[in-house]
Image (cartoon, grey):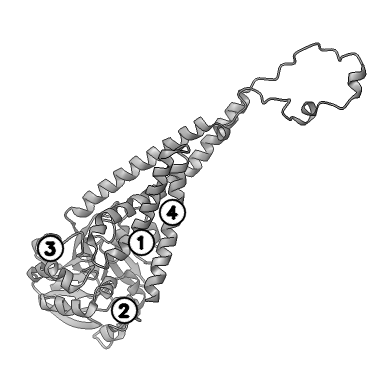
Amino acid sequence: MFAVVGFVTTLALITGLIHLYLWKRLVRDTTTAGRWRRIGTVTAVVLALLVPATMVGTRAGMYWLAWPGYLWLALMFYLLVLLVALEIPMLVTRLVLRRRTVVAAPEPVLVGPASPPAPGPSTTGPADPGATTGGPADPPAAGAVGPDHDPGRRLLLARGAAIFAGLTATGLVGYGVRTAMGPPQLDRVQIPLAKLPRSMDGLRIATVSDIHIGPLTGRAHTERIVAAINRLDADIVAVVGDLVDGTVAELGDAAAPLRGLRSRHGSYFVTGNHEYYSGVEEWVAEVDRLGLRVLQNKRLEIAARGGVLDLAGVNDVSAAGTGVSAPADYAAALGDRDPSRPVVLLAHQPVAAVEAAKYGVDLQLSGHTHGGQIVPFNLLVKLEQPVVSGLGEVDGTKVYVTNGAGFWGPPVRVGAEPQITLVELRSA
């Protein structure tokens, strides 16, 4: 309970500060006091409340909030990024215009006789304050007003920046929605393993993660992914976590097409962090019922083409402390095995490779990152995960990270298309 309250409070604070900045740049700086500014202010407040309302409401079954709330979240993100990026160019533009205006100001013209007036009684009195202090008696030179003191020019600059940011953000989000809601791309990658027997050369593992069956997708989304995987004619199917965003009661029908997955040596599943938000124990039972074998800190032998490969799986690292599932146990999954055989580990988060490498894992298949999902968010993912997308290496263990076939939160993907990967193992 306290964790939920803390999350909502933090979310409300962050979104409040972001909307305050957006209001300043998009409403206050682009309008004069009056009706339009009031309308913009009310709109900013409503949108600020929409973000936490969506995050909380969709968990409570108010799925009608999902589309408007998550679309605005994506648009808010890009407006923030673009407006912050425009801060320096806008500052430079104002300084340049101010300098040009000051340089263009005419020299003051001396009016009247050049010789000083004859001394008289009037010269003995106090001096005119305006003549020495630059007070009201000295009007500013014509044209010496900079853009920061020119409401018209300042308004024009602010509106130009707002229009550019608004159109660009809208275009990016529109493109991202089309990409996220479209079919996943099918990628193929060949990964050599030193211990793989020559007879098993070319063994194919269809790898998919982060399907995120939820309120914005549904059964058709699952059917399309299953059909794409079956077209690959793989030896093994690996579903590496974050299958769902909701309970079995809510999404059981949408997940049902998983029963149709086909492969020569079985389909396998490991939990992701979102399973622990959605009733992990019920989903483990449901996935098993649909024909996928759940590898919860387990290992099994895959005998194929006259050779043997160890296939292992661990629970997601977020399982620790949940009290509803065993934490990731690498010793249980990887200990006491034949070191001469290659081992492929299914683990939802790439960071699991830090521990897996201690057990001599040859290859780890992961997801979780979505490839960043929304550029430039991928730059932040690098702070948490050793590999964001594609093939990498952690302490001698090869790690392949697929972008995932779905999305989380905003139905938007920019710079990281949805993906299903056919991993082809090659003998070195």
Select label 1 or label 3 by which is in front: 1
| CB contact under 8 Å: marks 2 and 1 | no
Element at label 1: helix
What is the number of the mark on residue 18? Answer: 4
The C terminus lies in which quarter of the figure?
bottom left
Towards the viewer: 370 or 313: 370
Say left or right for 123 vs 228.
right
Mark 2 or 3 closer to N-term?
3
The location of residue 34, given as percent across then percent down, is 45, 38
Image-quadrant location for residue 73:
bottom left
Element at label 4: helix
Mark 1 or 3 closer to N-term?
1
Towards the viewer: 334 or 15: 15
Residue depicted at x 26% and y 46%: 174
Report, in whole angstroms, how far the alpha carbon at label 1 lies from the one at label 4.
Answer: 13 Å
The residue carrying mark 2 is 319
Select label 2 or label 4 by which is in front: 4
Select label 2 or label 3 by which is in front: 3
Report, in whole angstroms, how far the alpha carbon at label 2 lies from the one at label 4.
Answer: 32 Å
Report, in whole angstroms, how far the alpha carbon at label 1 lies from the one at label 3.
Answer: 27 Å
| CB contact under 8 Å: marks 1 and 3 | no
The residue carrying mark 1 is 52
> Given the image, on which type of amino acid does mark 2 rest?
Ala
Pointer 3 local density, CA inside 10 Å: few below 14, some 14–19, many at least 20:
some
Towards the viewer: 172 or 398: 172
Q: Is residue 279 above or below residue 411?
A: below
Report, in whole angstroms, how far the alpha carbon at label 3 lies from the one at label 4.
Answer: 35 Å
Pointer 1 local density, CA inside 10 Å: few below 14, some 14–19, many at least 20:
many
Select label 1 or label 4 by which is in front: 1
What is the number of the mark on residue 219? Answer: 3
Element at label 2: helix
